[in-house]
Image (cartoon, rainbow, N blue to C red):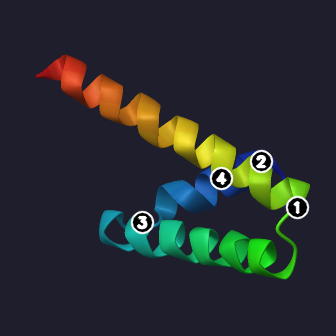
Amino acid sequence: MNTAEIWNALGSVPEEEMAHVATRLFALYEARLQQNPDDPEALHFFSNLDLAITQTCQCNSNRR
């Protein structure tokens, strides 16, 4: 699956299901870290997730 197809699939997920998608991704990478605390892919995922959360929270607070 290419990124355009993933974007389309993500766009078709109902808003109320997005938390389930995020939770599933978190759980998948969390399991990888439990198996290997030095897993570079999992560490990269959590670093990017932390950055995305920080940026989103900053944008939301700037809108208020």
Mark 1 or mark 2, earlier in chain: 1
Measured as percent of width and height from the top left, residue 47 is found at 67, 44
Mark 3 or mark 1, earlier in chain: 3
Q: Secondary structure at mark 4?
A: helix
Q: CA distance from mark 4 to mark 3?
A: 18 Å
Mark 4 vs mark 1, foreground winner is: 1
Question: Nearest the camera: 11 or 60?
Answer: 60
Number of disc labels: 4
Mark 2 or mark 3, earlier in chain: 3
From the viewer's perspective, is residue 29 above or below residue 41?
Answer: below
**Mark 1 vs 2: CB contact within 8 A:** no
Residue at horizontal 33 percent and vertical 63 percent from the top: 15
Mark 3, residues whose alpha carbon is within 10 Å: few (<14), some, or many (≥20)? few
Q: Amino acid at mark 4?
A: Phe
**Mark 3 vs 1: CB contact within 8 A:** no
Residue sitting farthest toward the front: 37
Mark 1 vs mark 2, foreground winner is: 1
Q: Tell whether 21 sits left or right of 56.
A: right
Mark 4 or mark 3, earlier in chain: 3
Q: Amino acid at mark 2?
A: His
Mark 2, residues whose alpha carbon is within 10 Å: few (<14), some, or many (≥20)? few
Q: Quadrant of residue 48?
A: top right
Q: Which residue is mark 2?
A: 44
Q: Which residue is mark 1?
A: 38
Mark seen at residue 12: none
**Mark 4 vs 2: CB contact within 8 A:** yes
Q: Which residue is mark 4?
A: 46
**Mark 4 vs 1: CB contact within 8 A:** no
Mark 4 or mark 1, earlier in chain: 1
Measured as percent of width and height from the top left, residue 59 is found at 32, 24
Q: Amino acid at mark 1?
A: Asp
